[in-house]
Structures are given as structure tokens and as C-alpha cells.
Amino acid sequence: MKRGKKYTEKAKLIEKGVLYDTEEAIKLVQETSVAKFDETVEAHIRLGVDSRHADQQVRGAVVLPHGTGKTVRVLVFAKGDKAEEALAAGADFVGAEDLIPKIQGENWFGFDVAVATPDMMGVVGRLGRILGPKGLMPNPKAGTVTMDVAKAIKDIKAGKIEYRLDKTNIIHVPVGKVSFGSEKLLENFQTLMSAIIKAKPATAKGQYLKSVVISSTMGPGIKINPAKITE
């Protein structure tokens, strides 16, 4: 893949084969940001687990202290009082069975996170094949299947992110924007890593944090020394 001149110049700031301390890596990720827009800073964490085994799944959610810098649109599956509670709490969309033809038939995905009350999971389940692959399926582990819809919405709007393993045992998550500055990015990153370390499955053997890389949307990847990351 051919890279632009700007990218190539910025990439020279990163020493090949070096595992950086977190603070250094975060400063570098800002220095190597190449786009004219405010890039998202992303973390890519490879874990020493096998996601094919149910007892080695790593999945959960964490509220980043400074949010993600992104406006998150929340859809809530609820009825009656809970639907009203969701609207009052700032949900962008609220509905029940009426959402099925909209999502299935019209291919509508004008939301970033879906929340559901437990009694609505029968309805939501009918959308599993569509929402699942897009990572939009409400899940109790992520706190998106709950009776406390107001708290779920508040947390999501405040910067709650979900983390989960992909098929190659890597977690990909945003930790903020380049414009946040080093201090806020560092706090967000440490909060995320603490949650992932605490979520280590009891059956995981050997080195848990295999590799940790951060990068801006368009910038080069910077490797962080996993041995120096603690809770």
C-alpha cells in the first residue's frame, strides 16, 4: 500500500522495533497525526486467549472518563413507562416491534448503540442476524440489556464504550480524539486497559497482553510495551 509523503515523514518519528512506554506512545500518536480533521485515537490489543472457546471470551464495557469525543446516537427497544423514561433520558430513538420492518426492510442503521429492556429481547432477537454482525446487538455483559434504561443512556452518552474480541483475538476500540491532549488520552487509555486486565478469563494461560498498539485514524501504529501496563 502506497503511503503519502506526509505519512512517510511522520512515520520516521517512530523507531522500528521499539516498545514505547504509554506516555511516550500517546505523545507520539499526537505528533504523527496527519489528517486535517480531528482524528480518533484507537487502541488495538491482541490477547493471549482463544476466542473460539466460550470460557476465553473477553467482552465488557467501560465508561471513559473523558468520553470518546464522538456524539453517540442511542436506540432503545422499550414499551410503556420504560419508553417514556428512555425519551426523558435523551435516547435518540425509542420503539418496539415497529422498529423491526424499519431495520429489516429499510436497512436503517441511524444509531450507534442499541439498548433494550429484558422483556424486549424476544423482539430484538428477531433482528439478531442483522444487528449481531454489526456489533449492535444489546448484551447484558455490556450493560445494554437492562431495566435501568436511563442509566444506560447516560453512561453511553458520557463515553461508555464496549470492547470485545474479534476472530483474531484482537480488541479494537477508540480512546478519544487527538485534540484531547496527552493527559485526557492517557486517563482514557489507562481506564480501558484496567477494565481489560480485570476481564482476564480464569482459563487464560501464559502472557495475557500479547501486543498493544495505538494509532490515530490516518497515522502509523505505535507499539506499547505490554509488560509495563498494569491495572
Image (cartoon, rainbow, N blue to C red):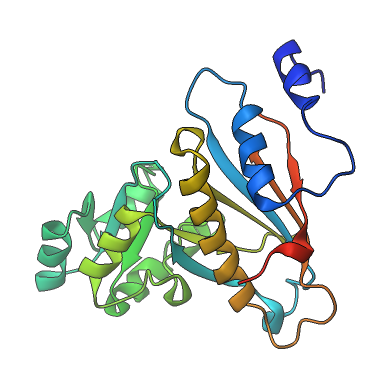
For the point 62% across and 38% down, the residue is 27
Q: What is the tally of numbered marks visible in this picture?
A: 0
Percent position of residue 173, x then y:
57, 52
Residue 125 location, quadrant: bottom left
Find residue 30 and report its horizontal and vertical position in percent: 59, 32
User: Percent position (x, y) of residue 157?
Assistant: 30, 53
Q: Name the outermost residue toward the bottom.
A: 202
Q: Is residue 56 left or right of residue 48?
A: left
Nearer to the camera, 106 or 5: 5
Image quadrant in which you'd find residue 42: top right
User: Where residue 81 appears, x then y in whole percent?
Assistant: 9, 72
Side of 90 where 28 appears, left or right: right
Q: Nearer the viewer, residue 165 or 96?
A: 165
Residue shown at 66% from the left, 75% from the top: 57
Q: Quadrant of residue 145?
A: bottom left
* Nearer to us in this view, 152 or 118: 152
Would residue 115 be seen by someone viewing this image from the given angle? yes
Q: Is residue 94 left or right of residue 63?
A: left
Q: Quadrant of the N terminus?
A: top right
Rendered position, 221 above or below 192: above
Q: Is residue 151 above or below residue 33?
A: below
